[in-house]
Image (cartoon, rainbow, N blue to C red):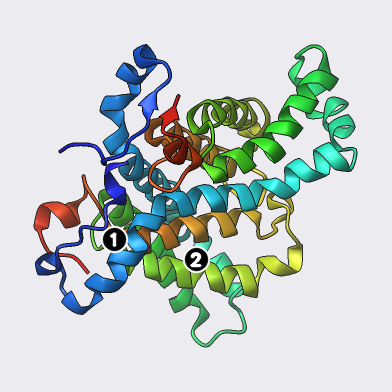
Amino acid sequence: MSADAGTPRPILPSLARIYQPLVPYGYAFLRVCTGAILIPHGAQKLFFGGAAALGSKTLAAWPAPLAWAYGIGALEFLGGTALALGLLTRPVALLFVIELLVFIFGVHIDRGWLWNRGGIQYPLFLLGLCLAFLFRGGGHYSLDRAIGKEF
Amino acid sequence: MIDETSAIDEHRLVIPGLAGLYRRLAPLAYAFTRVVFAVVIIPSGYEKVFQGGVHRIAAGNILKLGVEPPLVWAWAVGCLEFFGVILLALGLFTRPVAFALAVQMAVITFRIQFENGFFWTARGYEFPLLLTLACVAYVIGGGGRYSLDRKIGREF
């Protein structure tokens, strides 16, 4: 697989020899890292009591809050894994986009901007990344690509 | 960036009718994440550079890190978070800027937030870690299809 046509000429060819073989992996790397960072959130909800806390506090006003909390935990755990592997990338990314929009506008916007005060800064970053995965899908080096069918 | 191609094969799609939409959106994905990165970080840079934040971090986290002289490093951080991320979004000097940001975010991850654990809700390190990894992706991928580096035709 050749690089895009129109790739700029390297200013430091010796440096380019190091990164040039890695260039095709840039997008997959971003997808794997984003998926992986969501997994602990799901694990914490599913296996370490996070779902009960989420259901009894943040989602208390929802119908069947505990079911939603476990659903969100499952999305983060299984969906994070799927995103990292590039399996069902676009449907999973769409679910994360919805989840993040709900959390941004339902929870974090009241806490302002700054991430370390629970604001929207970090979920907004995740939202942008998941939108990009929705745009592009699994891409090269994904299970979607290996399977040969994707949404 | 190999994954910026608009060559979507509709025979691979479960819903072939979406191919046209994907052809328009897929090439934008990588550059879009760089713009999002900038949007998320610029307010932090603006506060540091234009609203006295450099003095706050020079007397706070930078002092705690023990790098000398603190105010110089504080300005470096502020400038990276404001001017640096603007360059990142534009895709100008993408790799050097992303490398500098990766170093900065790695220091924040491992030297400042690490003691708070993983979860961001407890001020943990996951957000700066993801920022670090995104910068590594930009060092790997460079400016790509929609970048000033590509327009100029030369890049680091």
Q: Residue at x 36, y 48 (%)?
A: A31
Residue B127 coordinates in the image, percent (x, y) = 58, 44
Residue B83 coordinates in the image, percent (x, y) = 69, 37
Residue B121 coordinates in the image, percent (x, y) = 64, 52
Which residue is label 2 attached to?
Answer: A51
The amino acid beneath tag 1 is Thr
Q: Is residue A150 above or below residue B139?
A: below
Q: Residue at x 84, y 26 (%)?
A: B58
Q: Residue at x 21, y 49 (%)?
A: A142
For the question of whether residue B126 can be seen, the reply is no
- Secondary structure of the residue carrying numbered label 2: helix
Quadrant where the N terminus of chain A is found in the figure:
top left
**Quarter of image, res A131:** bottom left
Tag of residue A89: 1
- Secondary structure of the residue carrying numbered label 1: helix
Q: Residues within 10 Å of mark 1 (few under 14, many from 20)?
A: many
| Chain at tag 1 | A
